[in-house]
Image (cartoon, rainbow, N blue to C red):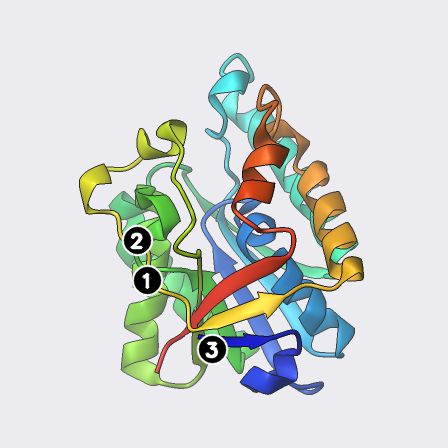
Amino acid sequence: MKKTKKLENIGVKQDSRVLGIFPHPDDETVFSGGFLNKAVEIGASVGIASITKGERGNKNLKNVPPEKLGKIRVEELGNALEYLGINEYILGNFPDGEVQENIEKIKSFIGNLLQNIKPDFVLTLEPDGIYGHPDHIGVSRVVTDIHKEQKKFQLIYSTVSDQFKVSEGALRMADNPEQISPIKPNIMLKLSISNIIKKLKALKAHNSQFQGESNVWEKLRAWDFFRYEYFHIKK
């Protein structure tokens, strides 16, 4: 595994176009906030696409109507990206929790995005969706299929280290929890103090997702997401 603190060492440059494609608001920050902020720092063009608005997210907000929660999460996404230095983001209007049922429409949506933006690098969650969430897996599969068909961009998977332990709550969202095996990273990205501070602020901006999760910061520290992020560059 290659260890680096500079994106230039994996080919991302000042004139690069980077597009992150994620299923829900907050996925971009938790798994790739440092990478995205580093890309902004070197002058790359960085954008985010969230396929859903995350209107069904967080069991602790079950009394909040989905439409209202979706609006809250979209606002949180904008605030989080502002901390990371990102001004461009695109929202899909696909139902949260129903990515698999809308896979062909989502493929068309993402295909059009890629055609319009023409990114050099595309960042998405690894094929098992980190912890088996069906929406995570669906979006990853679509991006992977398009990459196989076109080979017009470098695909980078956000993944986790061998020390990552899936929580019981996360496993309950998986269709086949016993089959989860996140792809091994081939890049270990060290975050700077500035990256860590901005990522922390961005995470806090996703406030609705952390309500009732008193140990979320302990989990993130245990997963090492404040010092390092892990990626797999698809060959």
Label for residue 156?
Answer: none
3, 202: nearer the viewer: 3
Upstream in sequence: badge 1 or badge 3: 3
Residue matched to label 2: 128
Task: From this view, report whether residue 162 is shown above or below residue 219.
Answer: below
Which element carries disc 2, helix, strand or loop? loop
Q: Which of marks 3 and 2 is in front?
A: 2
Residue matched to label 1: 183
Q: Is residue 106 left or right of residue 158?
A: left
Amino acid on which the number 1 mark rests in the picture: Ile
CA distance separating discs 2 and 1: 8 Å
Upstream in sequence: badge 2 or badge 1: 2
Q: Is residue 172 left or right of residue 123?
A: left
Amino acid on which the number 3 mark rests in the picture: Gln
Report which quarter residue 18 is drawn in: bottom right
Q: Residue 102: where, in percent of width, then height?
A: 30, 48
